[in-house]
Image (spheres, rainbow, N blue to C red):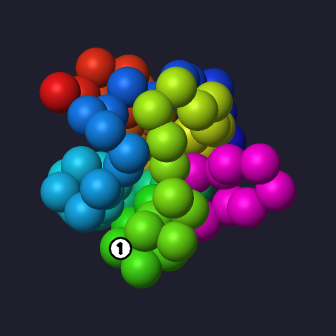
Amino acid sequence: MVSKTVTINLSGDAEARPVAVLVQRASQFDSKVFIRSADKQINAKSIMGMMSLGLSQGEEITVSAEGDDEVAAVDNLSEYLESAK
């Protein structure tokens, strides 16, 4: 399992479009991908789960993945969350 803590830099609060893009990116990987915020851990491939997190600009979260392409998944999602406009 690979994990990385990142600071969210999404435009505004994590509204529907940025979250949908995040789920779409996570779904491209075979690995199990999770986002942890505070005491919640959510499957990053679940749009409903991700919307329930209510991610906010500047919030620190942990991106983790387990599987054959775990490093690529964590790197891809971390880069998106840190630099999305």
Between residue 38 and residue 23, name the one nearer to us.
Answer: 38
Q: For this view, does 11 lie left or right of residue 73?
A: left
Q: Is residue 14 visible?
A: yes
The amino acid type, in three-letter code, at marker 1 is Ile
Note whether 70 is above or below 14 in the view shown. above
Where residue 32 sits in the image (x, y, percent)? 51, 61
Residue 40 is inside the magenta segment: yes
| Residue pointed to by mark 1 | 47
Question: Is residue 67 shown to the viewer in this render?
Answer: no
Q: Secondary structure at mark 1?
A: helix
Q: What residue sits 45% from the left and 32% below the top?
A: 57
What residue appears at the point 23 percent right and 28 percent down from the top-left corner?
A: 84
Q: Quadrant of the N terminus?
A: top right
**From the viewer's perspective, is residue 80 above or below residue 45?**
above
Identify the residue at image location x=56%, y=40%.
63
State the extent of the magenta-drawn residues as a range. Answer: 35-43
Q: Is residue 78 left or right of residue 17?
A: right
Where is residue 24 drawn, in percent x and y? 21, 59
Q: Using the rendered view, name the quadrant where residue 85 is placed.
A: top left
In the image, residue 85 sits, relative to residue 54, either above or below, namely: above
Residue situated in front as seen by the camera: 16 or 31: 16
Query: Viewer-proximal residue, 54 or 6?
Result: 54
- Residue 16 figure quarter: bottom left
